[in-house]
Amino acid sequence: MPAPPAVNSTAAALLGLLHGGPMTGGQLVAAAGERFGSFFTVTRSQVYRELPVLAEAGLLRLGKQGPRASQQYVITAAGKRAFKAWLTGGSGSDALRSPLVLRLLHAGSLTVKQRVELVSDAREAYTSRLEEARVAARGEPDPYRKAVADFAVAHTRAMVKLLDAIPVD
């Protein structure tokens, strides 16, 4: 049996979601936001760009046609092998890529008003995310998802702490 094709992180995210059953592109976008949106973003355009590539590679097949011409996708055995290869092939380390942290790094270039707005808006968003993350972590029975949910709480708490440390005046 030939080695499964290498997949990128976005493709792996979609393959992982499809392990739970067939989904349309819209369902994948929503599930990605719910399942791992606090630490790994997948945009609608990325999903719709990846799906035909994965299908052409034989990692997905088309499922049932849904309402309004929505198309379900189903993971294939080759897709499961490619996902497993991706899971086991990681280096164990990755880099944080945060446009907000980059903006905060350069916040000294902003006016006081701009800095106040940047920090205030971000703090409001992260405070809301923190409460959502805490609720998700409390209710998660799966030990792997619970560990990731606890990470989301810690990460979000750290972002609030970072925002509180940024001088605005």
Image: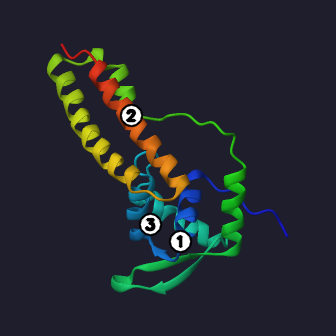
Name the residue that disc number 1 marks. 20
Give the SS element for disc 1. Answer: loop
Amino acid type of the residue that numbered disc 2 sits on in the rendered structure: Pro
Q: CA distance from mark 3 to mark 2?
A: 24 Å
Number of the front mark, 2 or 1: 1
Image spot of residue 149 (x, y percent): 44, 48
Q: Residue furthest right?
A: 1
Residue 111 position, x and y percent, is: 19, 17
Mark number for residue 36? Answer: none
Task: Decide: few, some or many residues near mark 2? Use Cα within 10 Å; few <14, some 14-19, many ≥20.
Answer: few
Number of marks in the rendered image: 3
Q: Residues within 10 Å of mark 1 (few under 14, many from 20)?
A: few
- Residue 51 vs residue 72, the one in the foreground: 72
Q: Which residue is mark 3?
A: 28
Q: Which mark is residue 99?
A: 2
Taking 160 as reference, is 94 left or right? Answer: right
